[in-house]
Image (spheres, rainbow, N blue to C red):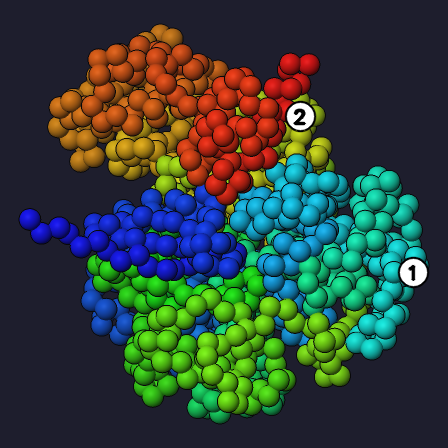
Amino acid sequence: MTQPVAAPTVRTTCPYCGVGCGVLATPDGQGGATIAGDAEHPANFGRLCSKGSALGETLSLENRLLHPQVDGARVSWDAALDTVTAKLRAVAAEHGPDAIAFYLSGQLLTEDYYVANKLAKGFIGTPHVDTNSRLCMSSAVAAHRRAFGSDTVPGCYEDLDEADLIVLVGSNTAWCHPILFRRMADAKERRGTKFVVIDPRRTQTAQESDLFLGIRPGTDTALFSGLLVYLSDNGFRDRAFVDAHTAGLDTALDRARQIAPDLAAVAAATGVPEADIAAFYALFAGTRRVVTAFSQGVNQSAQGTDKGNSIINCHLITGRIGETGMGPFSLTGQPNAMGGREVGGLANMLAAHMHFTPEEVDRVRRYWGAPRIITGEGMKAVALFEAIARGKIKALWVMGTNPLVSMPRADMIREALAGLDLYVVSEAVADSDTARGLGKTTVLLPAQAWGEKDGTVTNSERRISRQRRFLNSPGEARPDWAALSEVGRRLGHGRAFAFDSAAAIFREHAGLSAYENNGTRDFDLGALADISDAAYDATLPVQWPIPKRSGFRGAPQGKARLFGDGRFYTFDRRARFVAVQPPALALAASAAFPFMLNTGRVRDHWHTMTRTGKSQRLSAHRAVPFVEVHPDDAAAHGLADGGIARLTTAHGAAELEVTVTDTVVPGSLFMPMHWGGAFASQARVGALVRGMPDPVSGQPELKATPAAIAPVGYRARGFLLTRRQVAMPEGWWWARAAITGGWGAQFATADSSRAVALMVRGLIQSEALLGCELAEYADHARDRYRCAVYDGDRLVACLAYAPAGERPDWEAAKALFATEAPDAAARRALLSGALLSGRAATASAGPVVCACHGVGADVIASAIAGGAGSAEAVGAACKAGTNCGSCIPEIRKMLAGQTARAA
């Protein structure tokens, strides 16, 4: 008998955060793949976080957009592109080309990004091209440009291995960049590296720190201005470096003294005790090898650029930049935010890190042969969507992002779309909030997803890696660059858009980076400008710059660190100290909105969950959207842990489950960003935030919005588990999550048990459960109802409803539902009430703590009770924490709790 040939393993790159981990994908021949870390990739050396490890669970075609649509009707690609082309022409003719806008994504491949920018900025002639990276790292870009004259990340990941002090500012690295955090933890164990964490919230990263500075929101510039003064006044200025390679120190120091003249002033501004500030300053001053890593807590601010420059100032005054184990380091949030910057994805950039001087505009015009090239900046994201609401933008093309969840004032944006003459969405999923938005003419174009598309991405350390195809494209999905190129050809620019492969686009992109460069620009891929298709397919990860060198042979070699020679990309080659503005929040708390709302990510989900939401492992740790509230505030406002609260701002509202915790300080709230309309009834973070933009970068404030909170009293709580998704009733609070064997929704409702029973019977008569058998228990006098639905012996749905104070046990029900044909005891448990208050007659592992290995809290608690006294011992007993380690802070918290109880 002939044995089947094993599918070859493909080296590719993870599609999540900016770490850029290498992935080994082995297709299973049935549309799925086995996933492992690539031990040879220098970003991760084989490690994967919980999200990366679960990539194989996200490849299903459920909810995929498979065919083009125009106004909800399936059409051919030709018809869809004819509609797009005709409408673009009509809008340009009637309103001018600047009535057309593109909103792109840090999840696009570089080749997609390049063609989009070339089409819009070079040939359509609109400057209004921006990206969701505006919400992610544009303040870091602006800070780099002000200080270095270019958007250059100076260092590399190896610096995290070799630093003696790592300062983490506004970055929950343990959860948001866990592979990098494990490198940092390894350095701590190997060389005693110290961690200082600066954040308004005591995050999981803070729990692992040697020193935690819990600053007030928005006061980063006060802290680092004080550090600049301290370094100058106490003899830590590197005079040789400052005098030879920088400019502007005196002005920056004068401003810093006005903001933070001494420790007392810094303590008053930040709310951090003087002793802790003094300890941080002494540690920074006395340690040569310092990396200051910053992320969204710095960037997502109305003063994000100044925050970044206040950090960079402290590295410049000490000359700690461009050498091993030191430097400012922006941790990027998306897999190709850096690649988007390279091709001009931001509205204030041209391609190849060029801007809008006449010389640079002319250079790109000649290289592209683009007579209609734009000559100035376009509108940044917040302004762009406000222009849609004003009717200034008449055509919008959104690619690979979900702004109706993630953009500030998302409700206003959703309403504004109705005024668009043309609304195009290139998307892989059919049910995202943005795909369901409607303009006068709405065109949905099916895009390839990860595993199907082919191209390059650039990670946070300037390392270009390949995303390679290992799955066939489903339905009629196409590469984004192919759809864009076809529109370019239909608009009459055939020669400029005659691309037939991602490799051809990459060659042109690399060629532009080297065109008339001669070392004057940081971004240079000249050594790859003539790369063959075969070499492109085999390209190993490499860091830029990679200039073309005469007589060079062999594989191109990039550069790990920049600025070690003291030469920057300003006109005089000197770095600039920047005088920053005094810290101030864009909006202050008030009597109506007394709390300050912070937003961010959770460990196991990504952006708006269109991918991670398919994985039951990733949905198990945080199954519902929540708001963190300090115990004092919870008591004062009648909020109970596990109850539901209504969170309101001047711009919108959300209803979230309450988590009472001292990780937030009194007066602060924290809400995650992930839950959109596909996964929750009312939890879109973008609907709440105003997003006042930074005046330099245009990045909106997403970390400090005045808010109010109050409990919501629902009559009952419960869950509905089904083998496939079903629509939830209007008026219910609900949150949907993938579970083993199907989908689960936790809900709260004001409806009675009788009304819920009628709703279930309606489902039985609907297409969703037609012909199935209903088994139910009802005690309407006590307002209780439970049911199970069977197709023969197969359990296809179950529901439990009880008064709000007696919530049915979600974890136990999931464990029962994992078996498609439950035995008699399990059938009885579904109806008997054994699922109330944790009395299920089943082996539940408890809420998941370690998503990588699927280890629940109860299993870890048992290991601790059995004598495991450390995170390492817990790992040896049950594997929890032995992969990416992002659950280790939670395990240590459980260990500390056990110690406290024992005491």
What kind of residue is marked 1? Gly
Residue 486 occupies quadrant: bottom left
Q: Is residue 75 above or below residue 669?
A: below
* Residues tagged 2 and 1 counted as in contact (Cβ below 8 A): no
Q: Which residue is found at the position 37% from the left and 70% from the top?
A: 538
Q: Which label is found at residue 203? A: none
Residue named by callout 1: 235
Helix, strand, or loop for circle 1?
A: loop
Residue 783 occupies quadrant: top left
Q: Which residue is found at the position 34% from the left and 13% from the top?
A: 841
Q: Which residue is found at the position 78% from the left and 58% from the top?
A: 288
Q: Is residue 169 above or below residue 714?
A: below
Give the x, y percent position of residue 106.
Answer: 48, 62
480 sits to left or right of 517: left
What kind of residue is marked 2? Pro
Residue named by callout 2: 631
Q: Which residue is found at the position 44% from the left and 18% from the top?
A: 807
Along the line of sight, which residue is nearer the eye, 805 or 541? 541
